[in-house]
Amino acid sequence: MFVSIASYKGGVAKTTTAVHLATYLQTLAPTLLIDGDQNRSATRWAKRGSMPFVIADEKEAAYQARNFTHVVIDTAARPDSDDFEALAKGCDLLVIPTTPAVLDTDVLILTLSAINRIAPNKYRVLLTKVPPPPETEGKELREELQRQGIPVFVAEIPRLKAFERGVTDGVPVSTVHHKIAKRAWEAYEQVGKQITTRHREINKLTSKVGKKETARIARK
């Protein structure tokens, strides 16, 4: 399975999402993270400690990917609409992390409108850095995206200091020893489970009922 992570702006936990989805998928089967970000953020993160999966840059990717069951791609930052379309077509699922912010939501919806026309079943938005109650920005963003017909993960990633600790230590939060880190990891586990469940259902339907029904499941 190929999963690409892309964001229309910086600071939305793109690399954090790539690292933790690769960590989850590695618990299921050999997983490669392709570090396609210009800053090599995932590679620098791993150099501070260790990761449970293999990391390669895009130059090595073509050769390396054949040895892995799952591939997670941390893409270059700030793609334009054409880039988003190409990314969606070139993977099983394009994950788009986004944070609750009113002005950013307008930009996100405009960006995703093009993908909706070209590859409507190949992407899903992940809410990240969601503030705790009583703040309502996360809930409001989810409702607005759903009103616009944009697919959103049921799970969301809370705004937690544990992620910063993981970066400092050079590890995913799954190995940070703190009760808050456990909550942070469980959030990404839920996202990973939704991705793998969707992938299994689509594979089953593709072989049984053809493309129309497959597209319907993909929109769920």
Image (spheres, grey):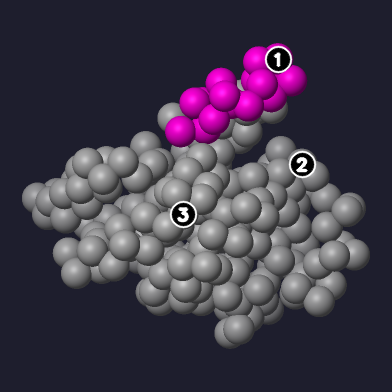
Residue pointed to by mark 2:
29
Q: Residue at x 74, y 20 (%)?
A: 207
Quick check: 81 left or right of 104?
right
Q: Is residue 41 left or right of residue 14?
A: right
Question: For this rendering, which residue is in front, 44 or 2?
Answer: 2
Q: Which residue is mark 1?
A: 208
Image height check: is 97 above or below 45? above
In the picture of the structure, the residue carrying the numbered disc 3 is: 115
Give amino acid for label 2.
Answer: Ala
Cα–Cα span, label 2 and label 1: 25 Å
Q: Front-most of 206 and 201?
A: 206
Asked which secondary structure carries label 2, the reply is loop
Element marked by disc 3: helix
The kind of secondary structure element at disc 1 is: helix
- The mark that comes first in sequence, 3 or 1, is 3
Which label is found at residue 114?
none
Membership of 134 in magenta stretch:
no
Q: Which residues are magenta?
A: 204-219
Q: Is residue 71 left or right of residue 78?
A: right
Mark 2 packing: few (<14 Cα in 10 Å), some, or many (20+)?
few
